Image (spheres, rainbow, N blue to C red):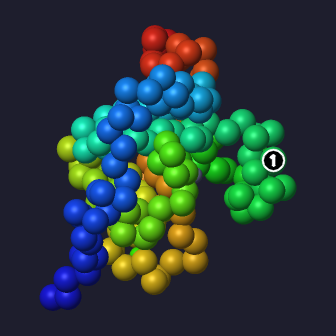
Amino acid sequence: MVNNEPVVNHGAALRAMMNRPYLENPKYDEQQWRANREGAHPKILEFEEAMVRRMASLGVPMFAHCIVRTPADQDAAYALGRSRLRGSDPYPHRFAAVDLIHCNRGWDLPEMCWDMIGHIGNEVAKRLSIPIVWGGDWDGDGDKSDQKLYDPAHWELAHWRMMEPEPPHMYNARGKLVRRE
Ligand SMILES: [Ca+2]
Ligand SMILES: [Zn+2]
């Protein structure tokens, strides 16, 4: 059996991402509520919340840069070349995906850091029993050379293509499910 687990220097990766004082900065809190959560699937929000909290416990400030994109947002992302999908296509950020980035460095992290984030995210998802797909290794086989797109900030519910977006009125401003009909 071949061990495809990537070799990650967690100490160096962690040091490159840590910024404990920033976790107390009001800007950190402000960043947490920037993304549009309206209509997001509760499982992606549960994952996002747990992941941000887990990274903060390690001293690493992260936030959800993007959760829900409306069809118009998706068309804009397509026009800017940020996505290959149009608003009329099925697309994961309709309700089932999150882009998690570093609060100070955004996407600008070395690959060893993304590897560590990927590893921790998969652990968090497993603990919550949420089947998740990471954009740093889409098929989850530990091999990053077998994919066309490397998008390590991106996480999506594994079976979103078989799910329906929930009506937005069932959610409060923080994206929490408030009632079911
Ligand atoms: Ca792979
Ligand atoms: Zn994404």
The residue depicted at 49 percent of the width and 42 percent of the height is 103
Query: Dot 1 corresponds to which residue?
Result: 76
Local packing at callout 1 (Cα closer than 10 Å; few below 14, some 14-19, many 20+) is some
Residue 54 visible in the shown view: no
Taking the spot 57% from the left edge, 71% from the top edge, the residue there is: 149
Q: What x and y, as percent, mark residue 122?
A: 30, 55
- For the point 36% across and 69% down, which residue is it? 112
Is 40 placed left or right of 4 in the picture? Answer: right
Residue 1 appears in the picture as rendered: yes
Q: Outermost residue, right direction?
A: 79
Residue 28 in the image: state x and y as whole percent.
47, 30
In the visual, does 128 lie left or right of 37?
Answer: left
* Residue 5 sits in quarter: bottom left
Q: Residue at x 29, y 42 (%)?
A: 59
Disc 1 element:
helix
Of 77 and 116, the residue lying toward us:
116
Near-viewer residue (121 or 110): 110
Three-letter amino acid code at disc 1? Answer: Ala
